[in-house]
Every structure is written in C-alpha cells, then in structure tokens.
Image (spheres, rainbow, N blue to C red):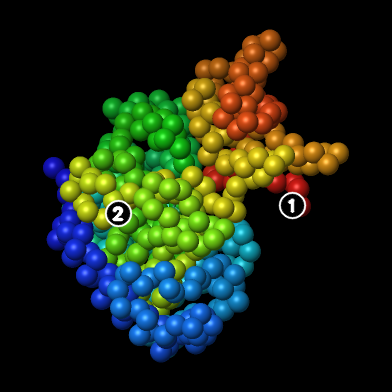
Amino acid sequence: MEKYYQEAIECASREEIRAIQSERLVKQVRHVWDNVPYYRKKMEEKGITPDDIQSVDDLKKLPFLSKADLREAYPYGLLGVPLKDCVRIQSTSGTTGKRVVAFYTHHDIDLWEECCARAIMAAGGTDEDVCQVSYGYGLFTGGPGLNGGSHKVGCLTIPTSSGNTERQIMFIMDLQATILCCTPSYAAYLAETMKEMGYGPDDIPLKAGIFGAEAWSEEMRRDIEKTLGIKAYDIYGLTELSGPGVSFECSAQGGMHVNEDHFIAEVIDPETGEPLPDGVQGELVFTAIDKEAFPMIRYRTRDICTLTHEKCSCGRTHVRMTKPKGRTDDMLIIRGVNVFPSQIETVLLNNGYAANYQIIVDRVNNTDTLDVQVEMTPEMFTDNVGEISERQKKLVDGLKSMLGIKAKVSLVAPKSITRSEGKAVRVIDKRKI
Ligand code: DLL
C-alpha cells in the first residue's frame, strides 16, 4: 500500500493545488516586492507591480532569476527577512563559480524537512525503518535535509555522512539499516564493495535507496537495485530552493512528483524563455511560493527535463518531472554536436560496464576530441589485446550511434578510476583549462 506523509495535500485535486498556488504566489510576490529591493528592481524594469499577479496564470509575467543574479546579489542581496530571523545557511560546493549561500528561517527548515519526509514515505519508509543518511553533512544540503525528513517520519536515523565506506557497511549490517540515502555514484560504490566482501542481495537488510543530487541513468538504477536487492528511488532538489525534496519518486518510479504546494514548476525554452507544454523538453524553472528567507521567483535551474500532469498510479496528483538529462552547463559541444554525459553512461551500462568512467574532452589541432575511459569489470578483465580491442570497437560503435560522433574508448583496469563519495566528477574538459 502506498504511504504518504501528508496525504491530503499530496493527493489534493488539481483545483485545490491551483488555488493554493495562486494564493501563495500572490502573497509571495508582495513579500518580495516589499522586502527584496533586488527583485523589486527587476519587476520595475519589466514594468510590473504585485497588482499584476492575481493567480498562477500571471506567473509568466514575472522576471527570471538566474545564477548570475545570485552571484551579483551575494551574499545578502536576495534575503527576504531580517538576518536575525534566519537560523541556518547551507551552501553549494561552488564547482561552477561562486558558492550559493541559501538562508533559512525556522519555517523554511520545517517546510524542507517535510518535503524530505514525503520522499522517504514515498519510498516505503515508516517509523519502523532504520534510515542511514550517507549524503555529506555540513554545508551540503543532502545530509541535513534527509536527516530532518527521517526524523519527521520517525525512522531511526543513522547520520553517517559520506565517506569511510567500511564503516558505512558495518552500520548497514550491524544496525540492519533498511533505507539508504546517498548519491547514486556512492550507492554504486557501496554496492560494489559489499559484493566484493561477499554479501549478496539477500544478505543485505536494505529495502530502499533514496538517491539523487546528480544525474544517473535507468541502467545505473537497475545495477544498483540488483546488487543491493533494493528498490532505488530518485530524489531531486537544489540548494537555492532548500535542498533535496523539491521532487521525489513514488512506487511507480515514473518521474518525480514536484511538491507543488511549495514549488511551482515550469519548463521553458532556454533561448526564448517561453513556457513549454507537457512533454516538451526544456529548462526547468521553479518558483518557491512559501519560503521566507530566500524566496526564489522563477529561478532558472539549468536542468533539462520534461513535465507531465498525467495521472500517476501512486495516487499523488502533483506534476512529475523526468530525470534531468543533465544541465545546460554540463552539455558538451563536441565538434558542433551536443553531448550529454548521461547518454555516454547509457551506452556503457547497456554494454555491461559499471558506472566507473571518465570523459575527457580536449582540442587537438583545432579539432575537439572525446576520450571515454571506462573500467573493465573484474569479470571481463583480461590482458588479451585482441579481446580488449574487440570490446573497445563495440563501444565506439555504440557511442557513434547514440551521439552521432566518433569517440575514442580506452578500457582501463578495474579500480583505476577514483570512486566518488558525493557527486561524481565525470567530465574533464581540458578545453576550459
Ligand atoms: O544536490 C540537493 C540534493 C541533495 C538533491 C541530495 C538530492 C539529494 P545542489 O548541490 O545545489 O543541491 O545541486 C543541485 O544537482 O540543479 C541538478 O543539476 C543536480 N541534481 C540534484 N538532484 C538530481 C537528480 C543538491 N535527482 C543540482 N538527478 C541540480 C539529476 C540532480 N540531477
């Protein structure tokens, strides 16, 4: 039976959701106009005032916020409340430029943890569960968010944070953890290590995993599910909007339900900024309608996906987003062709490799080069040159038909690519160095 943390709102009718969104949006726009001079100026430049926003239909009149705005307004320029009302900050790792520092009031933390609690219950969690949180704790939102959600559900929470893989496994086994929360790349590493230690899926007490914070393919999901003997659920979020739990998967595993009573989702054409209909791929934009301290309006995430309002078998009525295919800023343009790391991952995993790979892009004699290094699995490891070149050729062909361009493939020995405990670094683009 499907479990809900807040059934009335998670399964509300579309009319109810619309009414909540409209009411909160109107209030939020007024709040921002009154308290965030940076955004008020943007509204004035567009010639609109809070009176122009009467319902969700007026959302598209509002100006976008982008990462560039966050940078410009850093650190306090987008605060919606006096600093004394803020009780926490969280921050991104800053791999793509300046760190984002997000602020929270008590209310904002409560809202965020509720979203994470919904995700845990959608993955089958109850107060009987032992939930191991192996996302990083600290400035990163993964650990604190899922920790808070796990408390709200009433699970016994094991706050291991990331790293120290042997200790992670000891806790899973000794405390009989039933839910594991971490990045998919770390889940894959834990699965690999447990397998090497001789644990089969039936020996492992885990039943569900809540994995997100980075793009991962369906093939990777299947691998992790098989090795750990669990059902693996995707979870999405970003620091700007609070952290994990902006959307989450249910038992149907067919896209992530956006917590629409807190976040309005739009998909836009990244070039024109025009909203796109369901099913059409574009850039995801969110409006946080009841966050106090850091009230993001029409924030451009740079994540690429589609939305669907189709009915879901789990009973939830909130819109679903597909797994983000990648980010507009992860997209590689190689010899004029758009390449997403997730497409390469799909080819590798479909050919029996694990998700231990690195993509190296360079420019040699004015021509872009794409070099995919992938580890052989221990089962396929060989020093038979003929066999290796046969395998490489198969991957080159597979990549050519997926991407339309030729890549160089290098098969490397098992364990030669560094494992990740948090978000994996898959791409090294030497053209940018
Ligand atoms: O990664 C929050 C999070 C923590 C989400 C734990 C899920 C679990 P940031 O560090 O600010 O926040 O990075 C946000 O990560 O814009 C996406 O590009 C990417 N991302 C997050 N979840 C997913 C996912 C956290 N499930 C950025 N699939 C986002 C693909 C994801 N990409």
**Would you place residue 151 above or below residue 110 in this image?**
above
Q: State whether residue 175 appears in this view.
A: no
| 427 or 16, nearer to the observer | 16
The mark found on residue 319 in the picture is: 2
| 186 or 3, nearer to the observer | 3
Q: Residue at x 29, y 62 (%)?
A: 260
Q: Residue at x 47, y 58 (%)?
A: 268
Give percent across and percent down for residue 135: 43, 53
SS for dot 2: loop
Looking at the image, residue 97 sits to the left or right of residue 124; the answer is right
Give percent across and percent down for residue 138: 47, 64
Give percent across and percent down for residue 136: 46, 56
Q: State whether residue 231 appears in this view.
A: yes
Give percent across and percent down for residue 408: 70, 28
How many numbered marks are there? 2
The mark found on residue 432 in the picture is: 1
Looking at the image, residue 31 sits to the left or right of residue 5; the answer is right
Q: Residue at x 70, y 13 (%)?
A: 385
In which image quadrant can residue 416 be found? top right
Q: Nearer the viewer, mark 2 or mark 1?
A: 2
Q: Residue at x 51, y 71 (%)?
A: 65
Does any atom of ligand 1 lie closer than 8 Å to the CB of label 2?
A: no
Q: Residues within 10 Å of mark 2 (few under 14, many from 20)?
A: many
The mark found on residue 111 in the picture is: none
